[in-house]
Image (cartoon, rainbow, N blue to C red):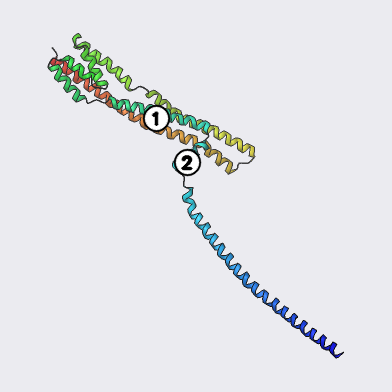
């Protein structure tokens, strides 16, 4: 009996010791867990700060990435205005500039050093070398030289016929100088006309959108009006560009006409003075 009680006492002591050890372990585990959790929270906070820094850097770099070139902006506006109405305006610019370039090149090639040419003609006529004067005119480009050649070619018919030839051929050369100006003026008028027409059609479409929506929404009205007015803007820009070159061409033609008139008077004076 005593042995049984002793055994039970030993078992009880061992059980109590194991129970206390389990409690101690359970108490220790939460402390370690709290440390691990605190470490995880610190790492998460650092990750959040890093992510915020990356986002701020991306926001700061975004404006530089979003910067668009002039051609990209022009392309976007062209698409927004509608290819159906922007294409005619673009064609007016292309054909108008082609004619402008052709006229500028022609007028620059038609420019002549009239004083030098008259000096050579005077020397030849003074020496009785009419063929030399005609050869000089043939080798000189420009309307002034052509007019002088026509006068020299009729010098045997009398000075009166020479004057008539110079006057008549001068009118022909003036008409050649003004060639294609009518077409340039047409494109100057057509470009804004196409733009206004596109604007009117765009406004009608905007009112149709308002009618479908059943409410005058600022978004609908502003979007439709912006697209409608783009055609007018581009049309006016094209007209302004062509008008500037058109006025330059007119100024150049007036300068050449003045040279032709002054040169013709001096040419006739040379013939009257030296030709017998």
- The spot of residue 178 in percent (x, y) is 34, 22
Left-right relation of 210 to 166: right
Q: Position of residue 116 (x, y in %)?
A: 18, 25
Q: Residues within 10 Å of mark 1 (few under 14, many from 20)?
A: some
- Quadrant position of the N terminus in the picture: bottom right
Q: Residue at x 42, y 32 (%)?
A: 239
Question: Outermost residue, left direction?
Answer: 127
Q: Secondary structure at mark 2?
A: helix
Residue occupying image coordinates x 46% and y 35%: 234
Q: Which residue is mark 1?
A: 97
Query: Dot 2: within a 10 Å radius of its alpha carbon, few (fewer than 14), some, or many (20 or more) residues?
Result: few
> Circle 2 is placed at which residue position?
72
The structure residue drawn at horizontal position 60% and vertical position 43%, both measured from the top left corner, is 217
SS at mark 1?
A: helix
216 or 190, which lies in front?
A: 190
Residue 235, image x, y percentages: 46, 33
């Amino acid at each position: 009996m005593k042995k049984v009680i002793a055994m039970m006492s030993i078992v009880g002591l061992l059980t109590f010791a194991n129970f206390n050890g389990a409690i101690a372990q359970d108490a220790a585990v939460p402390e370690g867990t709290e440390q691990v959790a605190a470490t995880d929270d610190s790492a998460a906070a650092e990750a959040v700060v890093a992510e915020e820094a990356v986002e701020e850097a991306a926001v700061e770099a975004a404006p530089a990435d979003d910067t668009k070139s002039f051609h990209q902006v022009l392309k976007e506006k062209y698409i927004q205005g509608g290819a159906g109405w922007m294409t005619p305006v673009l064609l007016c610019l292309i054909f108008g500039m082609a004619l402008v370039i052709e006229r500028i090149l022609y007028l620059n090639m038609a420019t002549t050093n009239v004083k030098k040419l008259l000096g050579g003609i005077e020397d030849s006529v003074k020496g009785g070398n009419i063929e030399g004067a005609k050869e000089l005119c043939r080798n000189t480009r420009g309307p002034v030289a052509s007019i002088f050649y026509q006068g020299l070619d009729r010098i045997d018919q009398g000075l009166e016929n020479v004057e008539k030839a110079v006057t008549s051929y001068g009118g022909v050369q003036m008409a050649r100088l003004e060639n294609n100006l009518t077409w340039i003026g047409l494109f100057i008028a057509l470009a804004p006309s196409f733009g206004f027409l596109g604007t009117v059609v765009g406004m009608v479409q905007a009112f149709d959108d308002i009618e479908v929506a059943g409410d005058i929404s600022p978004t609908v009205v502003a979007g439709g009006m912006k697209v409608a007015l783009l055609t007018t803007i581009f049309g006016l820009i094209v007209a302004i560009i062509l008008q500037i070159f058109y006025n330059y061409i007119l100024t150049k033609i007036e300068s050449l006409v003045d040279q032709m008139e002054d040169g013709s008077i001096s040419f006739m004076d040379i013939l009257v003075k030296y030709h017998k």
